[in-house]
Image (cartoon, rainbow, N blue to C red):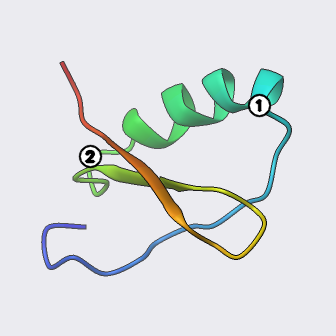
Amino acid sequence: DGADMMLEAEVVDGRAAAPLIEAWLSDPKVAYLHAHYARRGCFAARIDRR
């Protein structure tokens, strides 16, 4: 959210990520998303609205 607090978390196959990303970014409370690799939880990317 705007205070950098985690609102949701999910582990999904890469092919299932796009609909989940769209759904989460449609929530006005979500400021941005962080994508992580499932193994070891390493940061992969920040996802922002266009």
Q: Which mark is residue 14?
A: 1
Q: Please state the horizontal and vertical placement of residue 32, each as a whole percent of the image.
A: 28, 49
- Left or right: where does residue 18 sit relative to residue 40? left
Quick one: label 2, few (<14), some, or many (20+) residues within 10 Å?
few
Q: Are marks 1 and 2 in contact (CB under 8 Å)?
A: no
Residue most extreme to the right = 13
First in sequence: mark 1 vs mark 2: 1
In the image: residue 43, left or right of residue 48: right
Name the image quarter holding residue 1. bottom left
Q: Residue 28: which numbered mark, if any?
A: 2
Disc 2, SS:
loop
At label 1, the amino acid type is: Gly
Q: Position of residue 47 (x, y in %)?
A: 34, 38
| Residue 5, horizontal then vertical, whole percent | 31, 81
Secondary structure beneath label 1: helix
Q: Is 34 displayed left or right of 28 in the figure? A: right
Q: Is residue 44 above or below residue 10?
A: above
Instruction: Name the residue at 13% across, 68% down.
Output: 2
Q: In the picture provided, is 3 more to the left or to the right than 16? A: left
Q: Quadrant of residue 26?
A: top left
CA separation, marks 1 and 2?
24 Å
Residue 20 vertical position relative to residue 3 in the rendered view, above or below: above
Q: Is 26 drawn above or below residue 50 in the view shown?
A: below
> Relative to the observer, which residue lies in front, 26 or 42?
42
Q: Is residue 42 above or below residue 28?
A: below
10 Å neighbourhood of mark 1: few (<14), some, or many (≥20)? few
Q: Residue at the spot x=28%, y=57% of the render?
A: 29
